[in-house]
Image (cartoon, rainbow, N blue to C red):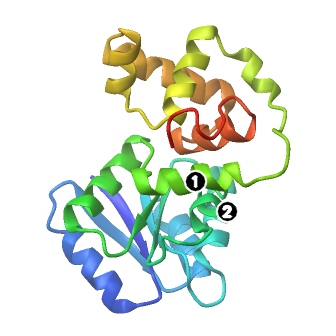
Amino acid sequence: MIRVVLADDQRLVRAGFRSILEDEDDVEVVGEAGDGDQAVAACRETRPDVVLMDVRMPGTDGLEATRRITADPRLDGVRVVILTTFDLDDYVYSALRAGASGFLLKDTDPDELLHAVRAAHRGDALITPSVTRRLIAEFAGRVKPPAPAPALNALTAREREVMELVAAGLTNDEIAARLVLSPATAKTHVSRILTKLAVRDRSQLVVLAYESGMVRPGWFGG
C-alpha cells in the first residue's frame, strides 16, 4: 500500500483527493492537514510514503513544510508532491529546491493525480514538460555562476552521461534506449548516482545538474 497524507487548507479539496485515492486498491490516505505545521506533524506521526502538499496555506506554508520534512532524517522515505493552482509563478523552482519530488496543478485529472502518487512513491521525477520548460527558464535567468559540486567527481563517465539525460527529463527506459542499455542497467546507474551524490530522488538530480553547471539551459531544446 502507498500511504498518503493530504495537506490543503480547503476541506473540500482534501475530500476530493481522498475520494479519488481511496478508490484505488494500492493507495491509503493515512492523514490530513490544514496547514504546514499540521502536515509536518502528520508525517512524523504516520510516516507516509507520499504527501500531497498545497503551497498556499495559513501560517506555515507548503514550501516551509516541505523543507522541514525533507530535512528530517526520520522522514527520509517521505516524498512530497507540491499541489498548486498556479503555474505562472516561482513555486516550481522553490518547491524542487526545498526537496519536493514533483509539482502538480490542482486541476489535474484523476489519472494524473494517481500517476503522480505512484511515480513519487517509486522515486521517479514528476515534472511535466510545461513545468520543465519553466524550470529551465528559471535557471537561465539566474545570474549566479554555477556552484561547485565536488561530489560530481565521484561519478564515472557513464554515470555523468546518465545524469545529463535525467536532467533532460528522460525516463529509465528512454535512457536505456538512448545509450543502448537494458532498462535494469539504466535504473542501476541512476540508483548509484543518487547514492553517490546523497540526493533524495531524480528531481533533486535535475536541480543539482543545472546548479552545478553540468548541463545548461537550451542544451535539450527546452
Residue beneath the point at 35% across and 8% down: 180
User: Which mark's residue is nearer the viewer, 2 or 1?
Assistant: 1
For mark 2, give the secondary structure: helix
Q: Residue at x 49, y 18 (%)?
A: 189
Residue 212 visible in image: yes
* x then y, percent, for residue 166: 50, 31
Q: Which residue is mark 1?
A: 135
Q: Is residue 117 left or right of residue 138?
A: left
Residue to which mark 2 is pinned: 67
Q: Does residue 20 sit above or below 187 in this rendering?
A: below
The answer, for residue 78, to whether it is visible in the render is no
Residues packed near mark 1 inside 10 Å, few (<14), some (14 to 19) or many (20 plus): many
The kind of residue tagged 1 is Leu
Viewer-side residue, 118 vs 170 = 170
How many numbered marks appear?
2
Q: Is residue 197 left or right of residue 33?
A: right
Q: Residue at x 42, y 41 (%)?
A: 124
Gap in angstroms between the C-alphas marked 2 and 1: 19 Å
Circle 2 Cα neighbour tier, 10 Å, few/some/many (<14 / 14–19 / ≥20)? some
Instruction: Pick the residue in front: 98 or 211.
Output: 211
Badge 2 amino acid: Arg
Q: What residue is rendered at 66% in x and 58% in y?
A: 98
Camera-side residue of 116 and 44:
116
**Element marked by disc 1:** helix
Q: Quadrant of residue 185?
A: top left
In the rendered image of this protein, does residue 139 appear above or below residue 163?
below
Q: Is residue 67 left or right of residue 179?
A: right
Question: Horizontal and vertical percent for residue 198?
Answer: 67, 33
